[in-house]
Image (spheres, rainbow, N blue to C red):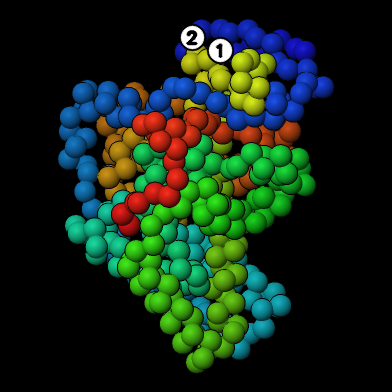
Amino acid sequence: MSSITHRKANKTFTFTTPAADASIEVLNEFYWTNELEPHFLRRKHILAKHPGVKKLTGHEPLTKWLVILVVILQVSTAYYLKDTHPLTVKFFLLSYIIGATANQAIFLAIHELSHNLLFRKPLHNKLFAIAVNLPIGVPYSASFQPYHQLHHKFLGDEYLDTDLPTKLEGMLFSNVLGKVFFTTCQIFFYALRPMFITQIKFTYIHLINVVYQIGIDYLIVTYWGWHSMFYFLMSSFLAGSWHPCAGHFIAEHYVLNENNIPKLEAKGEASKTYVPKELLPAETYSYYGPLNWLTWNVGYHNEHHDFPYIAWTRLPKLRAMASEFYDPLPQVHSWTGVIIWFVLNDVNSLWNRVKRSGKEKSGKKVGRLDVNS
């Protein structure tokens, strides 16, 4: 056992960390809390002090033209590589430098579309998301929206926030080799985990997404060949792997490095350690570096969770307007560094997420959700 001194909000707390030979229930657990997620309260205070923030909400018409240019770039590169074998340096470099960067931008354009921030009408955002899904290679956009809405509404909820790693992932991938595998194949966890945690209703939007993407893939393979198709798929894989822009997946909500307050001994429920409010770490982190130019300012993540209906072009204005709320918050200074620190630093692991127990909602067990998409 060892004593740790932690300073938060001008207060100092001293507490004892678990011994190295403590039970697995104590050493390997998430930051369990009964506290509400922080964004609702901060949004309320910001609006009370800065009512002009309301004028920043709404869609951004410019975005659709930029997204179209990114899609054209990807399609043009796929055509250029149609006669280039995937197992060549040229193919890999173009897939990594152009393809992964472009597809990460398309992933995050679909993220903007999931908040209806490109068009006034929700249906137009859904259909445009399906259209720009083209270079991803697999139908993705229709399922992303309802799951992402749950992530915002139920941040940290054990069953409804599918951005959270599962307990099995924490047990299997929290050592160095496991974290290398997790960060390398992160896109698969991000894409496949939701369907194992929470089921959403299959709608006509999902059907259009599937039919459209299969049709596009068929045309690509038929007229350009498998090399072009493989370029799309490799671009998507690398976009969620060891790529600088992929650092945002970990940077946004993992409690890392000095923010990782050691957990207390479990009391009461053996499988969960509930962290007192005064020791609960921040659970959302912003990044203000240059990679935001390639990712629609997704690094402004505290700002985004506080006001999901402010478009990417106006998030810097929100931060400037309410700087007294955002400047004191912990920040991430390098997405590339985040990936490296996450893998190599023993204090960082998949357990480093804030979770809320959400098994019971209004007295009913959460099962299949009827979520409009």
Going by the picture, which residue comes out furthest to the right? 21
| Up/down of 14 relative to 251, above or below | above
Residue 228 visible in the snapshot:
yes
* Residue annotated with mark 1: 7
- Residue 350 placement, left or right of 106: right
Q: Is residue 120 or residue 258 the one in the foreground?
A: 120
Locate the C terminus and report the quarter of the image it occupies: bottom left
Residue at x-position 60% and y-position 62%: 238
Q: Residue 172's quadrant in the figure?
A: top right
Secondary structure type for disc 1: strand
Tell me which amino acid carries mark 2.
Answer: Asn
Instruction: Residue 239: give x, y in percent of width and height.
Output: 56, 60
Label 1 crowding class (10 Å Cα cut-off): few <14, some 14-19, many 20+?
few
| Up/down of 317 relative to 294, above or below | above
User: Could you tell me if the residues under marks 2 and 1 are in contact, i.e. CB atoms within 8 Å?
Assistant: yes
Identify the disc placed on residue 10. 2
| Up/down of 50 relative to 275, above or below | below
Q: Is residue 304 or residue 140 the one in the foreground?
A: 140
Tell me which amino acid carries mark 1.
Answer: Arg
Instruction: Residue 136: give x, y in percent of width and height.
Output: 49, 69
Locate the N terminus and report the quarter of the image it occupies: top right
Q: Is residue 11 or residue 276 the one in the foreground?
A: 276
**Cα distance in 3D space between marks 2 and 1:** 6 Å
Instruction: Residue 90: give x, y in percent of width and height.
Output: 65, 76
Secondary structure type for disc 2: loop
Residue at x-position 63% and y-position 15%: 267
Q: Residue 61's quadrant in the figure?
A: bottom left
- Residue 298 placement, left or right of 274: left
